[in-house]
Image (tube, rainbow, N blue to C red):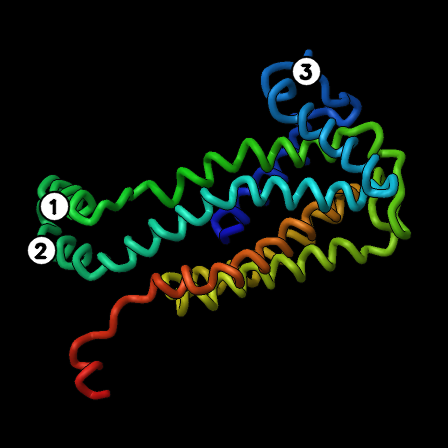
Amino acid sequence: MTSTLRVALVLVALVSVTTGCAPLDVPPDPRNGFFDAFFVYPISLLIDWLQSVLWGSYGLAILAVTILVRLLILPLTVNQYKNMAKMQKIQPEMLKIREKYKKDPEKMQKEMMRLFQEYDVNPMGSYFPLLAQAPVFFALFSAVRRSPHIKTASFLWLELGVRDPYYVLPVLAAIVTFLSMWVSQRLNPMVQNNAQMTLMLIIMPLVTLFVTLSFPSALQLYWIYSSAFTVVQTWLLKDLVRAMRPAPKEEDTVKR
């Protein structure tokens, strides 16, 4: 999961908690509307089935469905990285165009579009995957939160329908969120030495801690699983991420 998506998920979680957009006492049901019928309810059924084949454990079922969903959207993530790599490589040309036509916004836009077409870059390519992922993540989030079976289940020391009484999971969620963002930033030159991203590296784990404190243990587990998957995914895709590094300048090559 990218840092941008992490921000989006935190905002979704905040809205969900503060507005009660999906009441806790309404189980997933296809009669509740389009979103329940095609997203939340199928995921809820999948979790129930996985629980039945994973020794009756909803904790493991949530882990399994998280991995399945993340693998399903993995091609979108790979395409996102590829588009970011292209954007990084044409960054010097983009800066030249901005400087040259800073007094002519219309001309600047035309030149930018010409540059994007020349290098087959979609300027919105980094955001389309986020938009495509949002319904899936929110559906999984809602299914875990509203499932009547999960509410009464237990896992390890946890009662999945209530908060972790020892606050272990919120702390772990904050730590894994920090790790997922830190790994992404370490491997992504586009955000290295960026003051705003450094600030987010501090703020987002704290926001995660604050938000997940009010979550039932099932959602806290989901958050930890998803963030841990992001760490592994980013590490496995590190070569693709490093492809975003701009080519060394000619004078640097001569010095070597």
Q: Residue at x 41, y 60 (%)?
A: 240
Q: Residues within 10 Å of mark 3 (few under 14, many from 20)?
A: some
**Residue neighbourhood size for the residue with mark 2, other residues' Cα within 10 Å, grouped as few (<14), some (14–19), many (≥20):** few
Query: Residue at coordinates 54% horizontally, 49% vertically from top-left?
Result: 6
Please provide percent x and percent y for residue 150. Answer: 82, 34
Residue 129 on image: x %, y %:
44, 40
Mark closest to the chain's N terminus, 1 or 2: 2
Q: Which structural element holds mark 2?
A: helix
- Mark 1 and mark 2: Cα distance apart in space: 10 Å
Question: What residue did someone put label 1 on?
Answer: 111
Q: Residue 113 vs residue 162: left or right?
A: left
* Label 1: element kind: helix
- Specify the amino acid type for callout 2: Lys
Q: CA distance from mark 2 to mark 3?
A: 56 Å
What kind of residue is marked 3? Pro
Where 49 sits versus 27, above or below?
A: below
Q: Quadrant of the C terminus?
A: bottom left
Cβ atoms under marks 1 and 2 closer than 8 Å: yes
Q: Is residue 49 above or below residue 167?
A: above
Nearest the eye: 188 or 216:
188
State if disc 3 and disc 2 touch (CB < 8 Å).
Answer: no
Callout 1 amino acid? Glu
Circle 3 sits in a helix, a strand or a loop, which is it?
A: helix
Q: Nearer the viewer, mark 1 or mark 2?
A: 1
Residue receiving disc 2:
100
Q: Position of residue 173 (x, y in %)?
A: 69, 55
Separation (CA) of disc 3 from disc 1:
49 Å
Report the residue that reaches farthest toward the bottom. Answer: 255
- Residue name at image x 81 percent, y 38 percent: 53
Give the residue pinned by disc 3.
Answer: 30
Q: Is residue 245 left or right of residue 157?
A: left
